[in-house]
Amino acid sequence: MNLIPGALRSMIRRFSASKSFVRAHERRTCACVGEIYFVDRGFGTRGIVDEISCGGIRFRPVHSYVLERWGDAVSVRFGGYALDATLVNVSPKGYGLKLRTPLTEAEVDEIVEADEAMFGRAA
């Protein structure tokens, strides 16, 4: 009996989002230049906030290596905002951050609209 295919399927299922998974807040794309600061480690790095929602942010660092620091407290600064968050996901696409204090829909709209106005793009 070959156990490898079964084990492989089990691992894939483990990392796949459930078909019934629904995000609490709509993600919006943007391209806000900013910085992430790792509070406990005492250092920061520059990058781009490329997705934002009321509850979270995806931050893409400018460096090519990814620090696997799940659960770390971070501060994200961009476009006049300084937001406290927790690092909840690390992938080649960037860091998934859960905001400690959710943004309002109006604040998300303001951030996305300011980004679009700066670069002359429409949503």
Image (cartoon, helix red, strand yellow):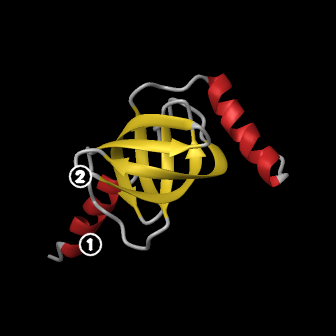
Q: In 3D space, how far apart are the residues under numbered discs 2 and 1 (Cα atoms)?
A: 40 Å
Residue 43 sits in quarter: bottom left
Front one among 120 and 122: 120
Q: Give the residue at x 37% y 49%.
A: 37
The label number, if any, that marks residue 41 in the structure image: 2
Q: Is residue 44 left or right of residue 51?
A: left
- Mark 2–mark 1 CB contact (< 8 Å): no
User: Foreground residue, 37 or 108?
Assistant: 37
Along the viewing direction, whichever of 113 and 20 lies nearer the viewer = 113
Residue 123, position in %: x, y? 79, 45
Mark linked to residue 85:
none
Which numbered disc flags the more N-terminal residue, 2 or 1? Answer: 1
* Vertical side of 94 occupied by 5: above or below: below
- For the residue marked with disc 2, what is the amino acid? Arg
Q: Amino acid at mark 1?
A: Pro
Horizontal and vertical percent for residue 74?
35, 43
Q: Residue at x 27, y 61 (%)?
A: 11
Picture quarter containing residue 26?
Answer: top right
User: Secondary structure under badge 2?
Assistant: loop
Residue to which mark 1 is pinned: 5
Q: Is residue 18 visible?
A: no
Residue 102's spot in the image, x, y percent? 48, 26
| Displayed quadrant of residue 63 | bottom left
Q: Quadrant of the N terminus?
A: bottom left
